[in-house]
Image (tube, helix red, strand yellow):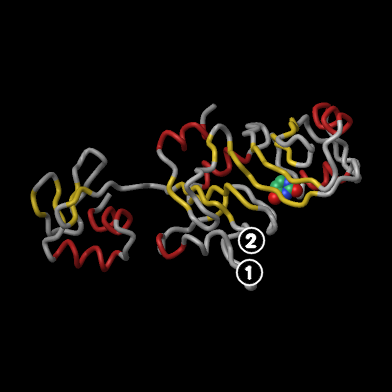
């Protein structure tokens, strides 16, 4: 690709800003200053900006700890969205959440601008497991656990695939649920079948990647290449 495009994407600036940087002699290609914005470069070239190596990223993949009250959307007229929380760091990326959490739910939301990746991990045939910590208003019963394992039929007749539920606390009020599909309000509706209400719902993991403990609500970090690969290929 052209050098000005590479720099604009790597430094998250506009094309005209990147051209200015190039013409000002701030950009090097394989160790030599290059002042030509139309210079063709590829992955094998070592690109520097102000003496620092800059790697081009085709796509970004972000692990966000969604706080309560934030909506899983790219934009919203009323509410703060998950994308609003990271937008200032990626002003030129068209980010969106790959999978949604309810406004009241918290935890791991994956933001990306890689449509094919998102499509792939959300595809029903892929069954990427999602792990949730759920606080109930009624203790977990054997009937619920057996029902989840067999596949719950929701009030509207929708038959869900099997899901795992295990207690995390001795009183049975905090449980872990692993789902392999994504139906609107799925966990709340599944427990609703047994007359149990959900007081809190936190997504802990997508595939085998767990939400980083170091991320407080509202904080985020980019996924490592190994984490992206773990989610994408199982
Ligand atoms: N199931 C729900 O009911 N809500 C969520 O946010 C996620 C799964």
Give the vertical position of 213 relative to 75 (above or below): above
Whether residue 78 is situated above or below residue 171 in the rendered picture: below
- Give the residue at x 50% y 43%: 212
Q: Secondary structure at mark 2?
A: loop
* Label 1 secondary element: loop
Disc ID at residue 79: 1
Q: Is residue 179 visible in this depiction of the protein?
A: no
Give 105 or 10, whichever is nearer the viewer.
105
Question: Can you name the residue that lies furthest to the left here?
Answer: 32
- Provide the residue designation for mark 2: 71
Residue 69, percent from left and from top: 65, 63
Residue 224 is drawn in which quadrant? top left
The CB of the residue at mark 2 lies under 8 Å from ligand 1 = no
Label 2 crowd (10 A; few <14 / some 14-19 / many >=20): many
> Is residue 207 shown to the viewer in this render?
yes
Tell me residue 26's x, y (percent): 14, 60
Find the distance from the CA under tag 1 to the CA under tag 2: 7 Å
Among the two numbered marks 1 and 2 on one chain, the one whose residue lies closer to the N terminus: 2
Q: Quadrant of residue 172?
A: top right
Q: Nearer the viewer, residue 220 or 56?
A: 220
Which of 2 and 31 lies nearest the eye of the viewer?
A: 31
Q: Residue lying furthest front in this view?
A: 170
Packing grade of label 1 (10 A; few <14, some 14-19, many >=20) is some
Q: Position of residue 41 (x, y in %)?
A: 22, 46
Q: Are marks 1 and 2 in contact (CB under 8 Å)?
A: yes
């Amino acid at each position: 690709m052209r050098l000005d495009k590479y720099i604009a994407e790597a430094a998250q600036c506009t094309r005209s800003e990147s051209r200015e940087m190039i013409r000002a002699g701030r950009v090097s290609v394989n160790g030599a200053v290059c002042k030509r914005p139309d210079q063709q470069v590829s992955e094998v070239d070592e690109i520097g900006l102000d003496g620092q190596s800059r790697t081009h990223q085709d796509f970004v993949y972000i692990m966000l700890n969604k706080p309560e009250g934030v909506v899983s959307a790219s934009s919203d007229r009323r509410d703060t969205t998950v994308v609003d929380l990271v937008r200032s760091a990626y002003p030129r990326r068209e980010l969106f959440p790959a999978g949604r959490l309810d406004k009241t739910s918290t935890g791991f939301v994956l933001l990306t601008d890689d449509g094919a990746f998102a499509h792939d991990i959300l595809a029903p045939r892929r069954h990427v497991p999602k792990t949730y910590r759920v606080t109930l208003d009624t203790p977990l019963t054997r009937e619920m656990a057996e029902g989840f394992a067999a596949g719950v039929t929701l009030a509207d007749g929708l038959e869900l695939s099997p899901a795992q539920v295990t207690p995390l606390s001795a009183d049975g009020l905090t449980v872990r649920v692993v789902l392999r599909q994504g139906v609107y309000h799925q966990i709340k509706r599944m427990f609703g079948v047994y007359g149990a209400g959900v007081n809190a719902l936190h997504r802990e993991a997508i595939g085998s990647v767990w939400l980083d403990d170091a991320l407080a609500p509202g904080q985020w970090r980019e996924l490592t290449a190994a984490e992206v690969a773990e989610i994408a290929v199982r």
